[in-house]
Image (spheres, helix red, strand yellow):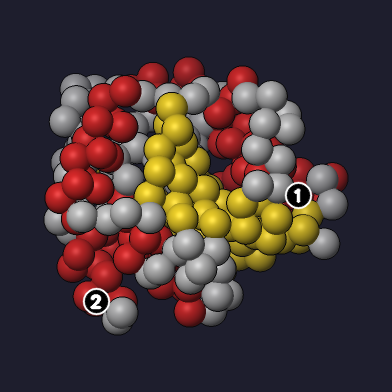
Amino acid sequence: MKLKELESCLQQVDVFEEPKILLEQYPTSPHIAACMLYTIHNTFDDIEGRLVADLGCGCGVLSIGSAMLDAGLCVGFDIDDDALDIFKRNVDEFEISNVDLVQCDLCSLEPDAYAQKFDTVIMNPPFGTKHNQGMDMKFLKTALTMAKTAVYSLHKTSTREHIQKKATDWGVKMEVIAELRYDLPASYKFHKKKSVDIQVDFLRFSKT
């Protein structure tokens, strides 16, 4: 599947109807989702035939894209009922069978609940702003316990040094695959601008 084709399919994925600020719910744009998945698939061969987890999956754009790229199975994890209802609707509309859902709070999972159960973990975690200080690192730590091979994640470029230090502490290799501009549309009442560009790193973590 070509990149443009993947992006155009992902444009059909429904997103949050009433996003929840406490969960930092922002949709991953079809463009960013397609670029991430295309790279994971073509450069690293970490999707096709693999068992993939999508943490904080929201409405499922990364899971659905993984399924289209022939993941063996992609399991989406999210805490939010409403998001998962939209996810289910999306899966039905695309008539995809290699996707499953788990509702849970990723930050309070037993450490070994899904230890090394997945080949690849993909996520666009909460950036850990305002009420969710450190949430990005909690997601990353959970992802690293779940993955056998690699974790792919988006993080604010401004946190790169901090994340690199953590990765070193955890004995994990971190690569910056790309620097992206995350166009954050105005989703909440307090947003004054129509959209804001945030500099974001697309990172790959692998077990050394």
Q: Residue at x 39, y 19 (%)?
A: 22
**50 lies left or right of 28:** right
The kind of residue on which mark 2 rests is: Lys
Q: Nearer the viewer, residue 36 or 101?
A: 101
From the viewer's perspective, is residue 16 above or below residue 49?
above
- Image quadrant in which the C terminus is located: bottom right
Task: Check disc 2 and report the residue beneath it.
Answer: 4
Q: Secondary structure at mark 2?
A: helix
Using the numbered discs, state the Cα–Cα distance from disc 2 to disc 1 in whole angstroms. Answer: 33 Å
Query: Is 29 displayed left or right of 161 in the figure?
Result: left
Identify the image quadrant of residue 68: bottom left
Q: In x, y percent, where is residue 96?
A: 27, 56
Compared to 37, does 16 lie above or below? above
**Residue at image location 49% in from the left, 25% down from the top:** 104
According to the image, label 1 marks what residue? Answer: 167
Compared with 180, 145 (above or below) is: above
